[in-house]
Image: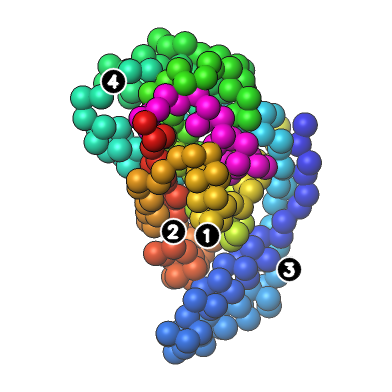
Amino acid sequence: MATTKVLRAGHYFLATQGLAMIRDFLDDPETLGARADEIAEIVAGMAEFPHSLEVPISRYEVEDGYTRWAPVYDGPNPAIDAEGPIMSGLFAALGDRIGVALDAACGTARHAATLAERGWEVIGVDRTPAMLDVARSNVVADFRHGELESLPVDDTSVDLVVCSLALTHVDDLSSVFAEFSRVLRPGGTLITSDMHPSVTTRGGMAAFPVDDPDGPPIAVHYVPNLTHHVSDYIAAILGAGLQVTVCLEPTITDRAIESFPSFALYPEATRRAYEDLPYLLIWQAEKPS
């Protein structure tokens, strides 16, 4: 079940303008006048379309949201588009290493498929049966239902753990990284990706489309993202006895910026609010031999 509230579009546009202004008030103060004019325009037109538009926003718990999202999760999805090539590059950098790989929170098995193609024996674990159904249709692997906090995988039984775009839904990073370390063999590798805290603290959510012919023409459906700071990840990784070898913070893509609803009306403000900000947070760590 979802919890639904209503957002007035004009308030969202004001928030975008405010983010743009806060980034420019020292380095580029001459742009603030144009931003203020647009803010005045939004406030004056709050009773008129599109600023008056009331958008239902429906918040889902993780399993319910990803059940609805599963059939179309792979795209269009700007986060996947940005993350996929980077993760594939890290897999390739492992060279000729193959063995048993765990795709934790495997979703539709995007990464499980890539790893299987590279010769890895893949185990996929996900908490959402609908995601596992899609995964099984995409690649032949050992898929299991389970939670990140309690992986259905034996101790020291895998050589590689991958976890993609899932940790932002986890309350306690420490318990999850402890599980990753438990299942890794000595000398094994962990690679994780997630939304950067710079995004989640600015309201970034796991939003997804819903095909509902009887619903409103414009609506937002989402699973909330929790904010885990870089220091939280470091503490969890080191606390699990792992050693960090790679930390990447790719910036937000043009495609992601252009997907924001404010871009159609206020492209300059939207671009300035988000450009050059970290978008993803990607880690690679090793379990000492």
Question: Toward which corner of the image does residue 2 lie, by quadrant?
Answer: top right
Location of mark 2 (residue): 278
Where is residue 254 shown, x and y percent of the image? Answer: 37, 56
Which residues are drawn in magenta? 166-189
Q: CA distance from mark 1 to mark 4?
A: 34 Å
How would you rate the neighbour count of disc 3 (Cα within 10 Å): few for under 14, some for 14-19, many for 20 or more? Answer: few
- Residue located 51% across and 13% down the image: 143
Q: Is residue 159 toward the left or the right of residue 221 in the image?
A: left
- Residue located 59% across and 74% down the image: 18
Q: Is residue 113 toward the left or the right of residue 58 in the image?
A: left
Amino acid at dot 2: Pro
Location of mark 3 (residue): 47
Q: CA distance from mark 2 to mark 3?
A: 35 Å
Where is residue 231 shown, x and y percent of the image? Answer: 53, 56
Q: Earlier in the sequence, mark 3 or mark 1?
A: 3
Q: Residue furthest front?
A: 289
Location of mark 4 (residue): 98
Q: Nearer the viewer, residue 69 or 115?
A: 115
Q: CA distance from mark 4 to mark 3?
A: 61 Å
Amino acid at dot 4: Ile
Question: Toward which corner of the image does residue 37 lie, by quadrant?
Answer: bottom right
Q: Is residue 54 toward the left or the right of residue 155 in the image?
A: right
Q: Tell me whether the residue at label 2 lies in contact with that at label 1, contact meaning CB atoms closer than 8 angstroms.
A: yes
Q: Is residue 183 above or below residue 267?
A: above
Q: Is residue 140 above or below residue 266?
A: above
Location of mark 1 (residue): 198
Say which element carries label 1: helix
Question: Toward which corner of the image does residue 200 lie, by quadrant?
Answer: bottom right
Amino acid at dot 3: Ala
Give the label, 4 or 3, closer to the camera: 4
Q: Is residue 201 above or below residue 43?
A: above
